[in-house]
Image (cartoon, grey):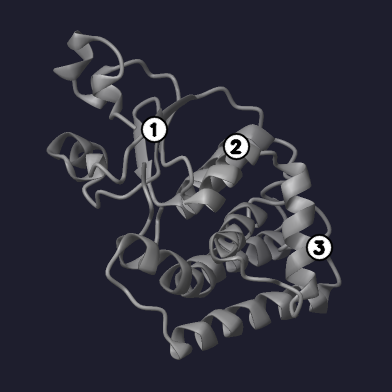
Amino acid sequence: MEIVFSLQISHSILPWSLNTSQDTSESILQRSCAMKLYSVSDGPPSLACRQALKALNIEYELIDVDYGKGEHMTEEYAKLNPQKEIPVLVDGDLVMGESNAILQYLGDKYDTSGKLYPKDPRARAIVNHRLCFNLAYYYRNISEYVMAPIFFDYERTPLGLKKLKMALDIFNTYLQRENTVYAAGSHLTIADFPLVTATMCLEAISFKLNQWPFVEKCSKECEINTKFCKERRHFRRS
């Protein structure tokens, strides 16, 4: 996962060991040019990218990276992403980390309709703002309170809970101000994918969204539009 302080959580055997023995000795850039996504099954940033790929009807190879086994920390993986974070997209000779950049690239190159990633400067600015808000504030505060104690020696604190609620307050305000169930307008955009998958983290601690009705509606609506039930169930059990 692209969790800030490197909880960009990642996860099953690295691609070069999933195929043939010949692949083991090859650089990723020497392999097939088909699109690949190095992903963690229950990592919100990875799920956001997968949702975008599905919404854009793009065929790609999904490569699971086992975060728990530290497969993202190997020298081979560092050739893909020196930050050693997940997800990573490979599209031909382009190798890119950072889920926001991946979402924007997919929108720029493959969203010919301009619905998921609007071409209009004002509409696009709102989408970009929501992406930045999620990365810098929303997902950060959720992941530090929910995810860090699961994966690291990290305690939940009253301050952490306060910051989590502040993040929910702000997202709820954005949605309420626009009177919409979508993060950045009247329809689904790439901004919804990371915000909703970040919100899904709260299920891991059975955190209720009753106090934030617009966030709750947004989450439910986008879950209807993007079906990743298997990952969601696994994430909830984790």
Question: Which callout, 2 or 3, points to the residue nearer the camera?
Answer: 2
Disc 2 element: helix
Residue at coordinates 60% horizontally, 27% vertically from top-left? 58
Which badge, 1 or 3, comes first in the chain's sequence? 1
Q: How far across and down, in percent of the image, does residue 112 sit?
A: 69, 35
Residue at coordinates 71% horizontally, 72% vertically from top-left? 209
Callout 2: 10 Å neighbours few (<14), some, many (20+)? Answer: few
Disc 3 element: loop
Task: From this view, report whether residue 60 is shown above or below residue 152.
Answer: above
Residue 197 horizontal side relative to residue 45, left or right: right
Gap in angstroms between the C-alphas marked 1 and 3: 31 Å
Identity of the amino acid at label 2?
A: Lys
Q: How far across and down, in percent of the image, does residue 139 sit?
A: 50, 67
Residue at coordinates 55% horizontally, 71% vertically from top-left? 133
The residue carrying mark 1 is 64
The residue carrying mark 3 is 181
Q: Nearer the viewer, residue 53 or 233?
A: 233
Question: Which callout, 1 or 3, points to the residue nearer the camera?
Answer: 1
User: In this orientation, does residue 182 appear?
Assistant: no
The residue carrying mark 2 is 230
Identity of the amino acid at label 1?
A: Asp
Residue at coordinates 51% horizontally, 24% vertically from top-left? 60
Residue 181 horizontal side relative to residue 58, left or right: right
Identity of the amino acid at label 3?
A: Val
